[in-house]
Image: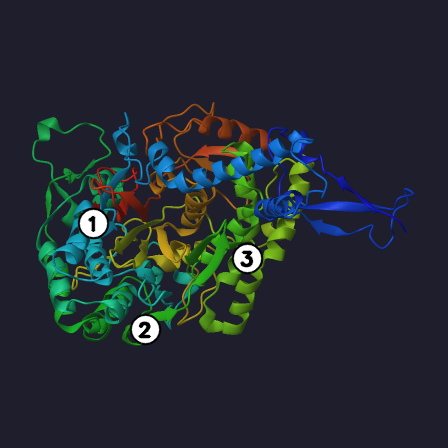
Amino acid sequence: MGKYEVIVEDDPELDEIQPDLVRLGSTDRDSMNYSVYSADGSVDGDQQSRRLTRPGLLERAYYRFRRFWNSNLPENWSGESDPHTVWSHLLRVVSLLIIAALVLALPSLLNLIAPTQLVAPGSSSDPGLEVSAQSGYHAAVAADNSHCSEMGTKIVTSNGGSIADAVVVSALCQGVMHPHTSGLGGSALILYYDAGKKETVVYDGLVNVPDGFDKSSVGKEDARGANVGVPGFLRALETFHKAHGKLGWKALVLEVSELAEEWEVSPHLAEVLRENSDYILEHDVLKQYFAKPFENDELLPEVDPIVLNKFVVLEAGETVSTPELASTLKDIAKHGSKPLYDKLSKQLSEEINAAGGKMNESDFRAYEAKKYDPISFYIDGYKIWTSPPPSSGAILAKTLSILEGYRLRRRGRNGLAYHLVIEASKLAFEDWEMMFDPASDASKSSANIKKMLDKDNAQANRAGLKLKIASREKVETLPSNLRAAALPEIARDYAGTHIAATDSGGSAVSFTATLGSRFADGLYSNLTGILLNNELLLAIDSNAELKPKNRPISGMAPVIVEDFERVQFAFGSAGGAASTQTMIETTLNAVEYGDDLATAIAAPRMTFELSNSTVYMEGINPEDCAPTSIFRRSSGAPFNYWEEVCTSLKSFGYDVSSMQGTIGVDGISVADVQTEAGDMSTKYFAFTDPRYKDSQASAQ
C-alpha cells in the first residue's frame, strides 16, 4: 500500500447548540477520530478505527524548531544568488531572540499589567456583599467571627504558636461566639498540610451513632435527644494539637474560657437571631441566653416577629454571659478532653436521655478521633487535597474530574456551563451511598473511591452528558437509576463553620465544624453549657445508613490546593450536601476560571435538588430573573452573567427558586508579591465570606 493521508472527522453536534463555544470534552479537543486512506483512495481496514492523539502545543513547537535548526543548505548556495533565503533565516533568528527576551521579561510585564498581589476588594453598594480580605507576611486566619480570626492570628504572631495552636483557639472561640454553628457538642473535620514533612493528613471528629440508637425516635418533637450523635469536635482538636501544636493546651483553652464568661453579640449572630427569633423565644434555654425582656410595653408592636411573651432577641454589641460553658472550658484546659468523654459522660447521657435519647456513658468513653490519608487528585495542573468518606470529598473530586474535560474557562460563565455543573454533580451524587464510614467495610470503601477518581470513568460520564446536551434533551427530574438512589435533601436548614489558616512556614489548615442545623434542636446541657448536635436527624433526612459506632455520611469537603509543592489555597464550607455543591462551585471559580480567592468566594451561587429539577439561585427573582442583590468581584466590578444563567437554566427545563439561608465559605491564599524595596516576598491572604455580615478575617 502506498502513501497515506489523514482525514480529520469532526463532530459538529455540539456547535449547533452554541456555535461560539468550544466543543465539549477533552476527547473532542485533544484527541480526534481519524480514518486512514491509501494513495488509491481506499480505506486501510487495519487503520480505519485508529484514534490518534494530537501533540500538545509545546511538543508541536519543539518539532518546528528542530526542523528549522537542522535544515541544511545546498553546497552551491550563496547569499547573493538567493537573498530571499538569507532574509528568511535572519528573520527566524531575530524572531527567536525577541521571543526569548519576552519570556525573560514576562514576570515584570505581568506585574505591571496584573500585579502578583491579589486585588483588594472593591467597595459595594451592598454592605453585606463586600469581601473581607486581610493580608500579612507571617500568618493568616479566616473565621466567621472577626474576634476569633484575630485570636488565631495573634497566637502565631505574638505568642510564637503553630498554625495548629491558632486553629484550636479560633475553633473554640467560634463555639462560644457563634454557638448556632459549631461547638463542643458537635463534629469537626480537619485537613492539614504539613509544609515541613510535605504531607497532608485528615483528623476526623465526626459524630458517632450511639449503641442504643433507635431510628424510629429520630425527628419526634418529644424525642430531641434521639437526634444527638456522640460529639467528636473536642477529641479531634485535642488529637490534632498533640500532633502539631507548639504551645501548651492549657494556656490556649484558658484564653477562650475567659471569653466565655462574657462576650458581645456579633453583627452576624444578631442577624441570625432576628431570622430565628420565633425559634429562640420558644425555647426557654435559648431565650435565657439570647433574649432580653421588652421593657417598654407602650412601644410593643401589635405584630412583630422578633417579640414573643414580651421578650426580644439580643442585638449586635449586647452582652452574653455563658458561665457554665466557661467552667467546662476551664476543666478542659486542665484535663484535656477527659472531662467531656469521661467525668461528665454520665450526666451528659442522662440529660440527652431525659429528652428522649438513648445515649450511654460508654458511647462517650469509647469515642476516638481518627487520623487517615486524604484524597488527592489533579485538575488543570493543580493538586487538590480533600477528605475521604464518610465525608464528601470524593463527590467533589468526581464532579471536578468530569467537568475538567469541558474546558469551562473557554466556555465562560453562562447557562450551558452551569447546566454542565448541575448534571455532572448529579452524576457524582449517584455515589452518595458509597460515602459510608470505612470502619464498616474498609476494602469496599477503598474500591469505591478508586472507581470514583478513575479518569476513564470521568470520560465515560462526559460522553453521556455530551449526547444528552447535543440532543437538546430537556431536564426532567433525574435518570431512573438516580431517582431510586438514596439522596440527601438540599433545601434544609443546615449550619456550620469553617476556619482556614496558614503561617510563614507554609503549613495550612482547612477546618470544618457543625452542629447540624442552626442551634441544632435547642438542646442545651444545663450542667456544661454545651449546645448538643442534631446530626442524626439530618443523616436520616439524607437517607444515610446509620449503624451503631459508625459515622454518618457528612457533606463536608474541606479543600487545600497545592501548586508546585506550595499551598495556593485552603478553603471550605459547612452545610450538608448543599455545602458540597458550594465547594464544587468555589473550587471551579478558583482553579478552572482562575479567579483570585476573594472573587471565587464572592461569586453568586446556586444549589440544586438531586431528586427533581429544582435549582436555588441566590440574588435572583425567580419569576423574571431580575437581580435582587449585586455580587461583586474583588476589583469591585459586578458579576453580570447571573441573569443570563437564570434565563438559560429555565430554558433547559429547570425550576428556578430563590435560595434560602446562607452557606458561607472562608479561605486563605498565598502569593508572591513585590515589596516596596523591589524584592519578591511571600504574602498570606485571608478571606471571609461577604454573606457573613461584618465578619473579618485576620492576617499579620
Mark 1–mark 3 distance (CA, rounded to whole Å):
36 Å
Q: Nearer the viewer, residue 49 or 203?
A: 49
Which mark lies nearer to you, 1 or 2? 1
Q: Nearer the viewer, residue 606 or 485?
A: 606
Q: Residue at x 48, y 72 (%)?
A: 440
Residue topped by disc 2: 368
**Residue 489 versus residue 507 in the image, above or below:** above
User: How many numbered tags mark residues here?
Assistant: 3
Secondary structure type for disc 3: loop
Q: At which x and y percent is residue 4?
A: 83, 46
Residue 113 horizontal side relative to residue 31, left or right: left
**N-terminal label among 1 and 3:** 1
Q: Residue at x 40, y 25 (%)?
A: 627
Q: Is residue 622 visible?
A: no
Q: Nearer the viewer, residue 380 or 550?
A: 380
In the picture, the disc for residue 149 is 1
Q: Amino acid at mark 1?
A: Ser
In the picture, the disc for residue 431 is 3
| Disc 2: CA contacts within 10 A as few (<14), some (14-19) or many (>=20) | some
| Disc 3: CA contacts within 10 A as few (<14), some (14-19) or many (>=20) | some
Q: Is residue 261 visible?
A: yes
Residue 355 horizontal side relative to residue 589, left or right: left
**Residue 108 versus residue 300 in the image, above or below:** below
Q: At which x and y percent is residue 41?
A: 90, 42
